[in-house]
Amino acid sequence: MSKIAEQGLVGIGFVSGMPNMGYTGVKGAAVATSPLAIAVPAADRAPLLLDMATATIALGKIRQAKASNTPLPEGAAATADGRPTTDPAEAGMPLPLGGAKGSGMSLAFELITSVLVGAPIFSAFHSDDPQGRKHRQNALLVAIDPAAFGDPEAFVASVDATLGTLKQLPPADGADGVYYPGERSAATAALRGENGIAVAPKVWQ
């Protein structure tokens, strides 16, 4: 998405994959965690880069919690048969973000990335065909040219103004500031570009 924003375009990306997340009302893994990404270019600021999944918690976070024996947040994960749990040793899958909302988003992403191009993942996975469980992923990437709607320079200037307005809002108690999606990541990338990437000993091993 950042490459699209670097070209002055608005990017929207949807991904579908192998079912590894619960679906509201279904026992066991039913849909994928299906990421959504949105990139919006700015004039003098880092672009807005929203990157999220339809799950309450990432699979990697569950693995990290399991390695450190740290309890998971309530409503974030479930056992393989769908029973909610905070025990990382029992957690077999994440639960959808916002319950039915996350479930619905994942199913919709399957329709517009997989079914649309004749390569369904969901129905094949839940069929009797063993090949249906072979790992696959599909994606739909959309690039929108702001010039189709008016002056692209005025657009990115207005994006800057919008993000600037957000950052001027009073921070909540205990917050160290107000940030937009992608802002802190851009600062971290710049810092690591200068100083290198710190790697924990366990990860290095």
Image: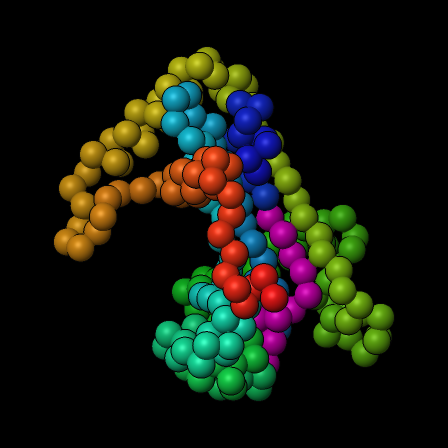
Q: Nearer the viewer, residue 41 or 66?
A: 66
Q: Nearer the viewer, residue 42 or 64?
A: 64
Q: Residue at x 47, y 16 (%)?
A: 152
Q: Which residues are magenta?
A: 14-29
Q: How is the protein colored in the picture?
A: rainbow
Magenta stretch, main secondary structure class: loop
Residue 190 at x, y percent in the picture: 46, 35
Which percent across, then down, holds residue 9?
A: 55, 26
In this picture, residue 196 sits left or right of residue 123: left
Horizontal placement of 25 versus 127: left or right?
Answer: left
Q: From the viewer's perspective, is residue 135 above or below residue 38? A: below
Residue 60 is covered by the magenta coloring: no
The residue sitting at 44% across, 14% down in the picture is 153
Residue drawn at x 56%, y 80% as measured from the top left: 92
* Drawn side of residue 18 relative to residue 47, left or right: right
Q: Quadrant of the C terminus?
A: bottom right
State the count of labels: 0
Q: Quick one: quadrant of the N terminus? A: top right
Question: Does the stretch in magenta take in 23?
Answer: yes
**Where in the figure is residue 42, as x and y percent of width and height?**
43, 26
Task: Report x, y in % for residue 130.
Answer: 84, 76
Task: Identify which residue is drawn at 54% across, 50% down.
Answer: 36
Q: Can see residue 133?
A: yes
Above or below — where is 68 with respect to 166?
below
User: Is residue 26 placed above or below 38 in the rendered structure?
Assistant: below
| Residue toward you, 175 or 83 | 175
Can residue 49 be seen? no
